[in-house]
């Protein structure tokens, strides 16, 4: 556990994470609910077949939980990843809007969006402290082994949401670079946030497992077996392939939906973020970034909800 994080296993040990329902598009939904004006919000949620899924406790079939310490580790690891997915989807959406602002030479809009991206990136980094807030001795025999049983090359690079966000960031950075030097300050702000994310990510990862990742072990083995092994092709065809992305979702209990409503998405985000703050403590600097990031995340979703056209009667 990093010095900045403090888990409360006596509180979370009895908890299990629940599933999460995410849009197949890997971005914040744009469709409001289909409820009529006479329906209450609660009634509309109860009628949504996806509404019950995200309340179902989830334990990956490849995972063996022996006691409350294991359960606490799984709760932090899985629940924290669910919020990361929400962060990545919101970040992808805002990056796309920022790229459009660059292309349209709308500097005021870009300067309003840039702090939101920074808050989301730094907040998602801070959330990693929650993902890893458990006894590091549990990681290898419980979590890493369960991921290896799911796939021997299991990696966060297999997340559909992470890939969508990375693509949106890449396109935004390319647009900013082409528009330089006019947007140099914005680009520097975003790059500083990225550096913080990678630094904090590495800090958390190295605390849990200072050795090679499962993916690194796998590709090294493949490279030793064949002189013609092509790492880039393996990433494109396997790591980013449909099967790997499905396996990654399946491990974390992710349900993909083409019909996920904004209302349900908002409710999930609110409940999952609130759960973190009921069960977690952080050092002031990391907590500040987490609170600012959570505020940005919920603001992105609520602004989308507020601007969506009303459902048809």
Image: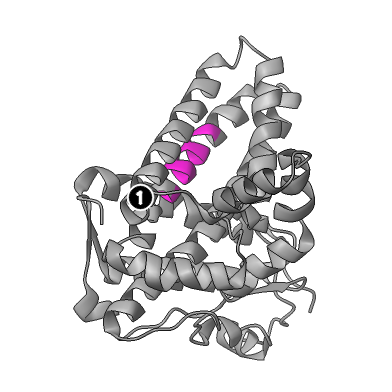
Numbered disc 1: secondary structure:
helix
Q: Is residue 97 above or below residue 272?
A: above
Residue situated in front as seen by the camera: 76 or 66: 66
Question: At which x and y percent is residue 200?
Answer: 37, 42
The number of discs equals 1
Farthest residue, direction top: 181
Location of residue 107 (image quadrant): top right
117 within the magenta span: yes
Question: At which x and y percent is residue 257?
Answer: 73, 73
Tell me where the magenta segment starts and ends, as one range: 114-124
Drawn side of residue 289 relative to residue 150, left or right = left
Drawn side of residue 2 relative to residue 78, left or right = left
Residue pictured at 51% horizontal, 83% vertical = 58
Residue pictured at 46% horizontal, 66% vertical = 144
Residue situated in front as seen by the camera: 94 or 156: 156
Q: Is residue 53 above or below residue 302?
A: below
Any part of residue 274 in sight:
no
Location of residue 96 (image quadrant): top right
Residue situated in front as seen by the camera: 245 or 118: 245
Q: Which residue is mark 1?
A: 204
Residue pictured at 65% horizontal, 56% vertical = 158
């Amino acid at each position: 556990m990093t010095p900045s994080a403090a888990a409360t296993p006596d509180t979370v040990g009895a908890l299990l994470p629940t599933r999460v329902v995410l849009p197949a598009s890997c971005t914040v939904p744009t469709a409001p609910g289909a409820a009529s004006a006479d329906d209450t919000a609660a009634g509309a949620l109860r009628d949504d077949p996806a509404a019950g899924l995200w309340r179902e406790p989830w334990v990956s079939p490849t995972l063996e939980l022996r006691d409350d310490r294991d359960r606490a580790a799984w709760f932090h690891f899985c629940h924290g990843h669910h919020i990361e997915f929400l962060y990545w989807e919101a970040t992808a959406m805002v990056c796309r809007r920022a790229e459009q602002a660059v292309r349209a030479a709308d500097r005021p809009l870009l300067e309003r969006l840039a702090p939101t991206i920074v808050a989301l990136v730094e907040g998602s980094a801070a959330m990693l402290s929650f993902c890893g807030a458990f006894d590091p001795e549990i990681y290898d025999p419980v979590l890493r082994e369960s991921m290896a049983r799911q796939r021997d090359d299991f990696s966060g690079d297999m997340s559909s949401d992470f890939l969508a966000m990375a693509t949106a960031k890449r396109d935004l950075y390319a647009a900013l670079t082409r528009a330089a030097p006019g947007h140099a300050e914005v680009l520097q702000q975003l790059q500083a946030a990225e550096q913080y994310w990678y630094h904090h990510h590495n800090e958390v990862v190295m605390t849990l497992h200072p050795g090679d990742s499962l993916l690194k072990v796998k590709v090294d083995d493949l490279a030793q077996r064949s002189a013609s092994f092509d790492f880039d092709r393996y990433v494109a065809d396997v790591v980013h392939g449909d099967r790997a992305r499905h396996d990654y979702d399946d491990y974390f209990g992710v349900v993909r939906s083409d019909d996920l409503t904004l209302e349900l998405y908002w409710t999930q985000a609110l409940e999952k973020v609130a759960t973190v703050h009921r069960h977690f403590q952080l050092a002031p600097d990391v907590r500040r970034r987490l609170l600012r990031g959570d505020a940005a995340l919920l603001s992105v979703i609520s602004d989308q909800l507020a601007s969506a056209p009303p459902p048809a009667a």
